[in-house]
Amino acid sequence: MREKFIEELFLLGEGQRVRIAGWVHRRRELGGVVFIILRDSTGVVQVVFKRDLLGEEQMSLARKLTIESSLIVEGIVHRDERAPGGMELHATNLQVFNLAEDFPLKKDTSKEVLFDYRHLHLRSRKVQALLKIRGTFIRSLLDWYDDHGFTRVEAPTFVQAAVEGGATLFKLDYFGRDAYLTQSSQFYLEALIFAFDNVYTMQPSFRAEKSRTRRHLTEFWHFEAEMAWATLEDMMNVVEDSLKQACERTYDECGRELDLIGRKFEPPSGRFPRISYDEAVEISKEKGVDIRWGEDLSTEAERAISLEFDEPIFVTRYPKATRAFYHKVDPEDNRKVLCADLLAPEGIGEIVGGGQRIDSLDELVKRIQEENLNPRDYYWYLDLRRYGSVPHSGFGLGVDRTVWWISGTETVRDVIPFPRTPTRLKP
RNA sequence: GGCGGGGUAGCUCAGCUAGGUAGAGCGUCCGGCUGUUAACCGGAAGGUCGUGGGUUCGAGUCCCACCCCCGCCGCCA
């Protein structure tokens, strides 16, 4: 079988014999010589097929090779300036495992058709690079939490009640009862901090909104953390430290991939600015955005603010009416709550949302009633305030959106292997 | 949910303003070429112009209805 990866071939010397395996990336045929660019997970190399080394029978096999055919080839390494990368393999033996049918993806294929064929497009070098960046970012992010006393936990995907009133849930039949797909693991994490103090999870969340934009998915990867005894400021520090480290490591480990996709990404180095909602409204007004105090920040306002800064920026203490019921009221101004959103630069918008949770039973019941929700639906969530309640804070980070920001692609769909949107359920 | 753009060959698009036998490039197939770099050269095949209805001698083109896709806003991560 395979002896070397393509990447390793470039370390070999002139005249060495080697056997590699991979897929036909490009082919160019002349009368008596066939050039194949062969791809594996580590890179590409030009393989040259000539009659004198291969013989007539294998030469005719080489002439039939189609794009994405899989093969094992033995040959002799040659340095040649005419070869891409300065090195090529002169084939001495060809073993075709599968002669591919006409590959449907060509140079002029539109983005939508590429997503129709996502199962095939994944093997492109660009998607490969993006998913490598994604994997590296996720690993680096989780490492930070593992190294800082957080316990990894999991929450159910089937749930009975909404976490927040606003977001729409996917409803499904659960043995004759109504159930929903989770839109956040937050409440479960709040229960788990009583066992572990600091917990995190990373799993999909689901939103049934028909949001047809380049930053929305109906199924997205949600990193969430919850911390006992933590204030809003503690929470922001955790977000900042972990995100900085994850960005730095991704930058360090994925230089080749960032180059390949043409992304000039600078990991944030300075302290993330923290501005209040009040200041955010002022900045928006100065930039000509039509906004009134008390309204949530519009996409236009978020963009105007994020373009003012080079680093991700926290916007804190929004008006109570713009946030879900579980946020703790700001003791310095009871019109506001102790929350923070993190806006990514370059107009990407919100990648983190979080804050300090209500720890008083009476206050929480009052807020649930004000939202016309039924406290009985939240019985176990209320229990957490009955038995040893503690001040606590937490947040959710949109993994896909963050990787989108790092990689600078056109849409968030580019950075997840199999995106789900209101109109896309396959492949 | 509101607004805008779009649906013509396998793919990317032109043709629609001014109705008159359906076009290009790429890809595919066939042939040529022993150093190609998204190779090149010659030839061929390939289309119920999103669906239904209407106007007209005649509709891809004009009118009506519907379906689907993309983007922006709202909602959020």
Image: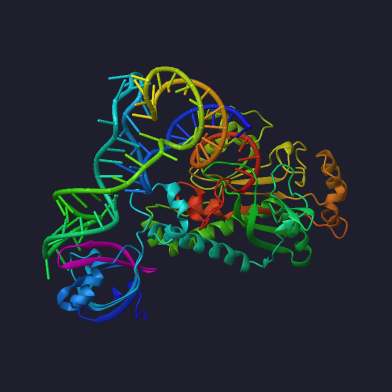
Quadrant of the frame with the N terminus of chain A: bottom left
**Residue at 45% of width from left, 49% of height from top?**
A408
Where residue A147 sits: x, y (%)? 61, 69
Query: Does residue A22 show up?
Result: yes
Which secondary structure is most common in the magenta stretch?
strand
Relative to the observer, which residue lies in front, A403 or A65?
A: A65
Task: Compare residues A331 and A217 and report the one nearer the observer.
Answer: A217
Residue A230 in view (yes/no): no
Rendered image quadrant of residue B31: bottom left
Q: Is residue A269 above or below residue A5?
A: above
In the image, A419 versus A405, the foreground residue is: A419
Q: Nearer the viewer, residue A37 or A314?
A: A37
Q: Which residues are magenta?
A: A23-42
| Rendered location of residue A273, percent (x, y) | 57, 46
Q: Is residue A186 above or below residue A31?
A: above
Quarter of the rendering containing residue A40: bottom left
Q: Position of residue A415 (x, y in %)?
A: 49, 54
